[in-house]
Amino acid sequence: MSARNTATPIATANKKTRRIQRELKVAGAELGLTSTALGRHLPPSVKHGDVAHALEQNAAIEVKVQEAADELAEVSELLDEEAAQRARLEGELALAQRAGPGK
């Protein structure tokens, strides 16, 4: 049986969430670098109209990507809490089953 088959759905979701969060953080940083480079190196004479709008949109997308990464961090924390609660409940169930009915 592979590790993927033995992992709980919560653990699998948490792993994927953390991977996507890391990717979003990198993408956000790359967007930030792009915005900064374009802002510094484009002459003022071209920073109007569509170019100005594109620079603004790039900055707005950077913020959205960072916010999505932050939200995924919160989701990961919730998944950690859920996994811990599940482990606790499974432990309690195992104890109850070993004790048997009425004990």
Image (cartoon, rainbow, N blue to C red):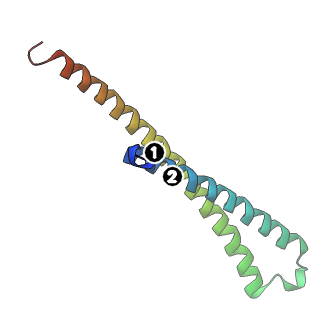
C-beta proximity under 8 Å, tags 1 and 2: no
Callout 1: few (<14), some (14-19), or many (20+) C-alpha neighbours within 10 Å?
A: few
- In space, the residues marked 1 and 2 are separated at their CA atoms by 18 Å
Q: Position of residue 71 (x, y in %)?
A: 52, 52
Residue at 40% in and 32% down = 84
- Write down the residue under mark 1: 3
Q: Is 77 positioned to the left or the right of 32 in the image?
A: left
Q: Secondary structure at mark 1?
A: helix
Above or below, comparing residue 101 to residue 59 in the picture = above
Tell me the amino acid under the disc marked 1: Ala
Above or below, comparing residue 23 to residue 53 in the picture = above
The image shows a total of numbered marks equal to: 2
Q: Position of residue 98 (x, y in %)?
A: 20, 18
The disc placed on residue 17 is 2
Q: Secondary structure at mark 2?
A: helix
Callout 2: few (<14), some (14-19), or many (20+) C-alpha neighbours within 10 Å?
A: some
Q: Is 63 positioned to the left or the right of 34 in the image?
A: left
The mark closer to the camera, 1 or 2, is: 1
User: Which corner quadrant of the image does residue 31 belong to?
Assistant: bottom right
User: Which corner quadrant of the image does residue 32 belong to?
Assistant: bottom right
Above or below, comparing residue 45 to residue 98 in the picture = below
Residue at 91% in and 80% down = 43
Q: Is 99 positioned to the left or the right of 10 in the image?
A: left
Residue at 75% in and 87% down = 49
Q: Is 41 positioned to the left or the right of 35 in the image?
A: right
- Residue that lies at the very extreme toward the left in this rendered image: 102
Specify the quadrant that holds the C terminus: top left
Residue at 31% in and 25% down = 91
